[in-house]
Structure formats: structure tokens, C-alpha cells
Image (cartoon, rainbow, N blue to C red):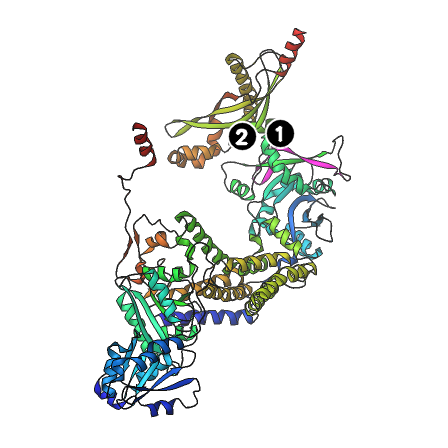
Amino acid sequence: MNDTESAKDPVSMSVFRERLTDCDDIFYTDVTVGDDIKCTVLSVDGMVQTSVLNDDVLRPLALDRDLRAVKSERDAIELIHSGRVYHCQRKLCETMTDAMSQLLFGSAILVFDGEGVAIAFDIKGFESRSISEPTNENVLKGGKDAFVESLRTNTTLIRRRIQTNDLKIVQMTIGRRTNTPVAVVYVSGIANGAVVEAIGERLRAADIDGLVTMGQLDAILHETQRTIFPHTLDTELADKFTGNLLEGRVGIFVDGIPFGFLLPVCINSFMQAVEDYALHPLITSLFRILRYTAILLSLVLPALYIAITSFHQEIIPTKLAIAIITSKRGVPFPTYLEVFIMLLALEILLEAGARLPRAIGQAVSTVGALVIGQAAIAAHTLSPGVVIVIATAGITGFVVPSQDFSTALRLCRFGLAVAATIAGLFGMSIGLILILYNLCSIEVYGTPYLAPAVGNEWRQLFEDTIIRRGWRKKLQRPVSISPADIVRARETQDDESTPDASSDTKEDGDN
Amino acid sequence: MKDTLRRAAVLSLAVFTLVSASSCRYTPHMTDIANFETIQIIGVDKGGEHGKEFVVTIVADRPAGEDADPVVGYMTVAGPTFTETMEKINTYATAWHHMGYVDYYLFGENAAKEDIGTYLDYIMRDYESRYSAQVFVVRDGTAAELIANANSKSASLLSMLEGNDGTMRHESTTETMRLIDLVNAMSTDHHCAVIPALSGKDFDFASTTADDLPKQIIVANGYAVIRDYKLTGYIDRDIARGYNMLYGKMYEAPVRVEDPDGYIVVLDVMNTMTEFNTTWSGDKLTEVEYKFYTYMNISEALGKSDILSEADLQYIGKQVSRVLGEEVQSVLDIQRENNVDLIEICERVRMKNPVKWAKIEDDWAEILPEVKVKFSIACTVRRSYDIKEPVAATQSGAEDKK
């Protein structure tokens, strides 16, 4: 801050009182320092640690020998700023904007009205949720500490995992009215500088009154794209966030949102779970193949059932056709209507389960699935075949680790079912082409959404996409996100000098 | 470019939806599967009241539901033409008869004698028809009779055909044939089509727990020979194995011969490999030779002496070669008498010598009678299962000790 700016916007108690009218949670404590120098300590009730304020700020102001002897505000400010008030985090605020920002961010500020400056002491201490297990992402083998609403706690979780000066945390505020702290996190030397710069620019350029939801952040970070597929990977797992930073992605934390956001992403980012890196590569690869198969089933199964039972009956094996026809005896609805009823019922059950408290939500899902489904079949309202198909589509949809991606798939499933109802497999093919076209048209900060299946980096499909290679092999970071350092792991050579059990035994025997 | 493509895609979809919603007749036709009747057997006969009508019998399997017993329903309809008869079936029926689930086509003997091409033409033109459906000729009877006589509460022709699929192969008397293979066989003038034949046999089991038995069961009864779309004769059941060997369809088959002492030994043919050679004089085919290598196991021995010596096994092998050789020779005799390529020699020649075949292809009908067909059968007994010596030999040995 230069002198010109501070001259235009000096710190003033009268301005504070004016701007903080009807803010009853602001505490004003008048303090006398030294030889009758009047100053005021301002703090927001509930956002500072009162004991720290008393012991580390107010007590030195009153008892320090040198401070008691000061004659002018200038001397007092210099002494305090040089460490007489020994709270470690202090900052000299020379403008009103800076001082107000520090106050509302949770600092206690000591205002010297005469000099037009304030000293901020960072003694934030508001009540917040402690680190707990994740609620949305289950972890079987991996760290269970999940992000919380406090930005600083979240950055600490990452700092504890990446203990290097290459971890950069760039903080800024967004929101004209909310001044929400936002942190851009990346690993210097791995993340692409252009991407970091582009994200920073978008965040800084955001002109919005407040940033309180994930949707607002998504709108700030991305251009308007006509797609329902997610562009930002959100996670509440510190392990997953760290892993993605080490892959070369850029993370974002927003104060008040207990998630970390990662960019740039491709479809594969939404298909990976934390356990993938804790299990044997072969098992992980099988799980990933299973996931891709499952999303395909989830997407096309209802539409395929409509198409083959309403338009292309000849492709159904005879025994299966007879089973389907038998199961539809007495059912008054055509197959497509049955499928839509069931799809709608499934969505209602999911929505009800999500909105209700967890215990009741589970009960609703169970009752809905078992009791109503069984009753509908018994009453010949629905056929068992349709119930099996929709249940399979529903369950396979839950295999996707990302809820956002799973939701997008559910919506596409409806679209495909409509297309299949209109024109059978022909319509379904058109629907799938449109979905593929949409996926092909998405780019997230220069990364194609379908990478590495598109472009010339298809070999990475067998490195850490569908197939995951072991850590002892040479591994590259995803080429599609253009990391600054492409090599993720170098091939490990077996150390021949390592004694094995058999040689030890032999030596012992010789001895 | 991206926007243009997107607009084009959206416009196409919109047009397609509008056309579909406007009851345009060129949109795909929707029929719910619940409205279908699943015909699984179609029987085709020639006869009816005037003796010249087409008679079609359809069989539909309706499995048990919660409130219904399983039913195998059949319906016989006659008409002046095959097409009209098939249309009549839909007129009389309560549900849409879908040809896509027909697994078996049965042609009555008279229908096969008349012109099998008429029915095949109709069947193959229907897009619903499955090419994997099996075809049979009903020997000495009609398809309608066979369907009616084989139907009961406890069994049906459908279940018998499904069950016999494996049985026929096991006996290696008659091999099944797919619809597409029949059409392929008929699409060439070089050889004739050979369709498996079925017959009804009176139900004569001594005891059974089933309360309602069919009048007849079905048995494989050799092959029907179709030439110029007409049934011209049969390869009998007792020599059908010879045809299978020549055609390359010999699977498991029991062969009964005598050991050196004159006692019966039964052997299982486990595998047969065929080597085919041709002899040419310039561009003229003079001789074809089949070399069969048959591997078998001893399944049953009723003699009293140990037959597992090398000399005895060689003797038994020769006996098997003789028995199988007689069957093969009988088929070759039929071929020679009728001057038809029953066993698709032409196909083997084509695959062996494609260039030379191209030169004689057009004259195959004239060349075939002059081509000498030779064959040899080498039988190898590989295993004797757990038989160390005949059961009778052990019993007689025990009696001797007493």
C-alpha cells in the first residue's frame, strides 16, 4: 500500500462506527497506552479467542514497561509492531479497507485514530466443525480425514501431506458482499503454469456479490458450456486432493465449503476412487473395467430394454422372450410406460432418501425398493423384468465414485429411454451419438474431456486410466493436462545387494 | 465449425422427433412384446381336404405363470397357397404370431416331395426368421400328425426336439441342420441338400410316473435327400453314420463288433479325423481318397478272455474298420446309383485345389460319375476305461477257484 492510498483511506474510528452501525457483535474496548494515549481494540464477538486477546494483546499493552513510557502514538505503534505485544501474527493496516477486512476475517485490531493506522492481531478462534470422516465418499483403505468448512484447516491438511516449499497456496477473496476467502493450491514444478494463471485470473475477475455455493464457483471457473457433465472434480478427501495435486492438477478451497475442487479434469477423473492406489494394480484395473462396464449398463439398459421389447423382438433369445412375455401377463401398461414409471419412482426414492435424515432415508429406500416393488409385481402393475432392469441400472449407476457424474448419467438415461421409445435402437443410437458428441465438445482448461481416449496419448489408457500400472514401473502424469514435469515415477530396479532370507540362513548355517 | 455441427445435430433430432410425433408411417413401428405369441415349431404339409392344400401347424410354448399351468398349444390351418395359409394363422390367432422365435421347421414328406423351395423362399424373406432354426423332414408321415401325437401334458414335441439335440449327436446317426445351411446347400447345383429326417415312434416304455403320456416319441431316422428342391430319397438310419463320416460330422458313436472268440465288444468312437486327397490327370480329376483316422475306447466287453493284448486290439480295430467301412460304402453306393454329390465332394475338391476346381466346376455333374472314390479307415483303441479284463472272465475265474 503506498502513501497516496493510505492518505485517501485512513483508518478512523468514526468511519468504523459509521460502517458498523447495527453490528451488535462488534466489541469496542478502549485502552490507554503509556502516557494517556487513547486507542481502541475492535473484535467480532465469537470470532476471536478471548483468552488470547486478554493474555497476548491487552495484558502487554497495559503492563509492558516500555509501552507505559511512550509519549506518542507513533512510538507506541513502532514498539507494538516491533514485538512488545508479543502475539506472533500481527499486521500493520494503513487503510480502512485493509483494517475492516482484517476485523471481519477474525482478527482483533488496535486502532490508533490519531495516526490513522491499525494493528491487526490474528487471533481467530470461532467455533468450527472438527475434522471427521467423510460423509459422501467412503474410504476402505486410505486416510479418513475429510475437509471441513474452515479454509485454513483444509490447507493445513494438504500442507501436512506435501511438506515442501513447492506447495503453493495463493489466497484471495471473492464476493463484493461476502469477501469469501478462496485459496488456489498447486505444486510448483508439476502444475502447468498457464492453467494456474488462467484459474487465478478467472477467480480474480469474478464480479459476484457472494460465493457461498459450489455452483457459483463452477460458474466462475468455466465458460458457459451446454452440457450436464461436471467440469470440476470435488472431493472431501484430503488424500484424493493431494494425489490430484501431485498429478499436476490445481486445487481450490473456498472458506465455508467443506470440499476441495480440482482442475483440469477429464472423464477418467470421475471414475477413480482413493482405494485404486491402495490395492494391487491388477485388482484396481479389474475394478475400473467394472466401473466403466457399470456406467455403460446404467446408461443404456432401460433404453435397450424398451428398444428390444418394443421394436426389435427378434434379437431376444426365445427362452428369454418367453420369460418376458410370461412376466407381462396381466400388466396393463406397455413396456416403455413401465420403464418410465420405474425410472421416475427410482428418482423419487433417491431424492426422498437424500432429503431425509440418514436413518429415515435408508428406511424409505428399503421400503420403496422392496415393499412397493414387490407389491407392484404382485398386483400385476409392473412386470418383474422391468423391475430387474431398472434396479440393475440404478445399482450400476452407484458404482461411479463421483455423485455429479452419476447424476448426469441418470439424466442421459432418461433421454436415451425417450429416444428408444420413439425409434427403438435407431433412436437409441442417435441419442448415444449426441451424448458422445457432447462429451467430445467439452474442454476443461485445454484438457479434452475424453482424454486420454482421444488425441495421441491413447497409451495412457493402459497406464493409469482403465488399466493401472504398478508404482515400480515407469509412470507418466496425464499428458492431457500438460504438467510441467511429466515423469511421475521412474522404474525401480531391484537392489541386488539386498540380502534375502535364504542367504541369511545359509550364512548362519555356515557360522 | 463446432457450433455448426451442434446446430445440425439438434436440428436433425428435432426433425426426427417431429416426424415421429406426426404419425408418419415411415417411422419404426412399435409393437409391445406382450402382444406376441411365441411360435417355436412350424410344421409344413401338403394335403388337406382336397389333397393339394398347404397345411401349416404351429406350436407355441406357454410356460407356467402364477395362475396358469404350462401349455404347449398347437394350431393347424390349411390354405390354397403357403402365403395365404400363413396369413390365416394370424387371422385366427388372438396374439401376433412372431416368426422370430421359431426354432424348428418340420417338412412333411409330401410337402418335401412337392417343392421345398416355396416354403424356404417365404421363410427366408421374412426378416424376423432366425437362420439358426433347425430343419427336419418328417419321414413316412406329416408334420401335423407328429406334432399332435407327440403332444401331452407331460411332454411335447418341443421338449423332445430340444432334448434330442444332444441325443442325436451322441448316437451319431443324424446330425441337426440349420436353416441357413439348408439354404446354402440349395443355392448350388453341384451337390444336393441332405436334411435330417425324423419319425414318430409309438410310446412303449414299460413304466413311467407321468400320468399323461404322448402317443408317440420322435426318433432320428437317417437323412432326406433333396435334389432340385424335391425330396428324392433317404439315407437310412443304419447307414447314416457312414454319411456322417464322409461329411465330417462323426461324433461319439457306439460300434458293436466281435472279439477273436466271437463275443461282443462295444466301442465308443471318440474322435475321427479325415484326410482328403485328390488325384489329377492334367486338369481332369480321376480319383478322390478319404483316409479316416478313428480313435475309440472300449465301452463294454462280454467275452471271457482278456482282450487288451496288442494282437486282440488290432483284431478289434479291424472289425470296427470293417463295420464302419460297410456303412461308408453303402452311402457311396447310393451316391453312385443316383449320380448325385451327396457328401459334398465338390466342396472338398474346391478347398483342396481351388485353381483346378475352377476349371472343372461347370462340368461337375458330368465329371462326378467318372471320379473314383476310395476310402480307408484306421481304428485305434486308445483307452479301455476301467476295464482290465472282461467281467465274464472274472466270474468264470472265481467259479473255477471254487
Looking at the rendered structure, the secondary structure element under dot 1 is helix
**Residue A346 appears in which quarter of the rendering?**
bottom right
* Chain for numbered disc 2: B
Decide which of A250, B377 is in the foreground and name it: A250
Q: Is residue B327 magenta?
A: no
Work out whether mark 2 precedes mark 1 in sequence or the reverse, and give the earlier one.
Answer: 1
Which region shows up in magenta? B209-234
Q: Is residue A388 above or below residue A422?
A: above
* Chain for numbered disc 1: B
Q: Which residue is mark 1?
A: B237
User: Is A185 placed left or right of B114 in the picture?
Assistant: left
Q: Is residue A311 visible?
A: no
Q: Is residue B117 above or below residue A145?
A: above
Categorize mark 2 by other alpha carbons within 10 Å: few (<14), some (14-19), many (20+): many
Residue type beneath disc 1 = Arg
- Residue placed at 32% from the left, 37% from the top? A500
* Count of numbered circles in the view: 2
Q: Which residue is mark 2?
A: B250
On residue A292, the disc is none
Q: Residue furthest toward the right? A: B211
Label 2 and label 1: CA atoms lie apart by: 14 Å
Decide which of A421, A401 is in the foreground and name it: A401
Q: Residue furthest toward the left? A: A3
- Residue placed at 66% from the left, 59% from the top? A374
Q: Where residue A276 appears, x then y in whole percent?
A: 41, 54
Q: Where residue B105 appears, x then y in whole percent?
A: 62, 44
